[in-house]
C-alpha cells in the first residue's frame, strides 16, 4: 500500500482554530495511507508581483513553495470569512502560483473541507477555493462535498481531535475518499505515462 505525502493548508491563524482540529482529525483517521503535515501560511507577506525572481522575494515564499512542491496531494481546510475564503489563504494560493509558469499547485490532487460554527458550513469559502484550484489545474475531489456546519468546542475532545459521533463519521468518510482520490490520480498518471 502506497502512503502519500499530503500538505494541509489551514485557512485560519487562530490558535484554537476548529479547522485546524478538523485537519488534525482527518490526518489521524487516515494515518496509514496519508502522511500529512500542516504547512504554515501565517508568515507569508502579502504577495507582490514585483518580488517575482528578485532578491527582495521573502524567504518564506521559497520555504512555502518548496514544501508544497514536494508533496503528493493538498488538503485545504478552512473557515469562511464573509462568505468567501480568508485573505490569508488566498494569499498563500497566490504565492504558490507564481512566478508565472512555475506554479507549485499544478496537477496536485486536492480536496477542500470547510468548517464553521454556523449552519452553512463555509459553503461560499469552499467554492471560492475550488474555483482557484480549477484555474490552477488541480484535480479536486468532486465528492463527497465537505461543508461542515455546527462545528464548535463541543466537537472535540481534550486531545484536540474530533469526538466519536456524527462529525467523526463524516470525517472518516472524507478521509477515506481523499486517500482513494489521491491514489486514483497518481495511478492514472502512471498509466498515461506508460502508454
Ligand atoms: C472576519 C470574520 C468573518 C466571518 N464570516 C463568516 C462567514 O461568512 N460564514 C461563517 O460561517 N462564519 C463566519 N465567521 C465565523 C467563523 O466561522 C468562526 O470564527 C470560526 O471559528 C473560524 O474558524 P476557525 O475556528 O478555524 O478559526 C467569520 C469570522 C470572522 C473572524
Image (cartoon, rainbow, N blue to C red):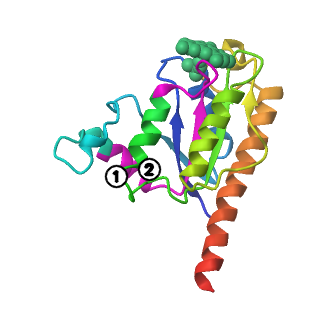
Badge 2 or badge 1: first in the primary sequence = 2
The residue beneath circle 2 is 68
Residue 171 counted in the magenta span: no
Q: In the picture provided, is 140 more to the left or to the right than 48?
A: right
Classify residue 128 by image quadrant. Answer: top right
Residue 75 counted in the magenta span: yes
Instruction: Determine the CA span between mark 2 and mark 1.
Output: 14 Å
- Residue 172 placed where, x, y %? 76, 40
Q: In the picture provided, is 103 more to the left or to the right than 135?
A: left
The residue beneath circle 1 is 99
Q: Nearer the viewer, residue 143 or 99?
A: 99
* Residue density around tag 2, few if under 14, some if 14–19, many if 20 or more, within 10 Å: many
Q: Which quadrant is home to the N terminus?
A: bottom right
Mark number, residue 77: none
Ligand 1 positioned in quadrant: top right
- Residue 180 placed where, x, y %? 72, 57
Give the magenta part as a residue range: 62-87
Report helix, strand or loop for mark 1. loop
Amino acid at each position: 500500500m502506497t502512503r502519500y505525502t499530503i500538505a494541509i493548508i489551514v485557512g485560519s491563524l487562530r490558535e484554537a482554530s476548529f479547522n485546524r482540529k478538523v485537519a488534525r482529525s482527518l490526518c489521524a483517521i487516515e494515518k496509514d495511507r496519508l502522511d500529512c503535515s500542516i504547512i504554515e501560511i501565517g508568515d507569508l507577506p502579502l504577495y507582490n508581483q514585483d518580488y517575482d525572481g528578485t532578491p527582495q522575494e521573502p524567504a518564506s515564499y521559497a520555504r512555502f513553495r518548496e514544501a508544497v512542491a514536494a508533496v503528493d496531494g493538498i488538503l485545504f481546510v478552512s473557515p469562511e470569512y464573509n462568505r468567501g475564503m480568508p485573505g490569508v489563504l488566498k494569499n498563500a494560493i497566490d504565492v504558490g502560483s507564481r512566478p508565472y509558469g512555475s506554479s507549485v499547485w499544478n496537477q496536485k490532487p486536492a480536496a477542500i473541507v470547510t468548517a464553521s460554527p454556523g449552519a452553512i458550513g463555509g459553503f461560499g469559502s469552499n467554492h471560492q477555493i475550488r474555483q482557484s484550484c480549477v484555474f490552477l489545474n488541480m484535480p479536486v475531489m468532486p465528492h463527497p462535498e465537505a461543508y461542515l456546519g455546527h462545528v464548535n468546542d463541543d466537537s472535540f475532545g481534550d486531545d484536540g481531535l474530533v469526538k466519536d459521533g456524527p462529525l467523526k463519521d463524516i470525517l472518516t468518510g472524507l478521509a477515506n475518499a481523499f486517500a482513494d482520490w489521491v491514489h486514483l490520480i497518481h495511478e492514472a498518471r502512471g498509466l498515461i505515462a506508460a502508454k
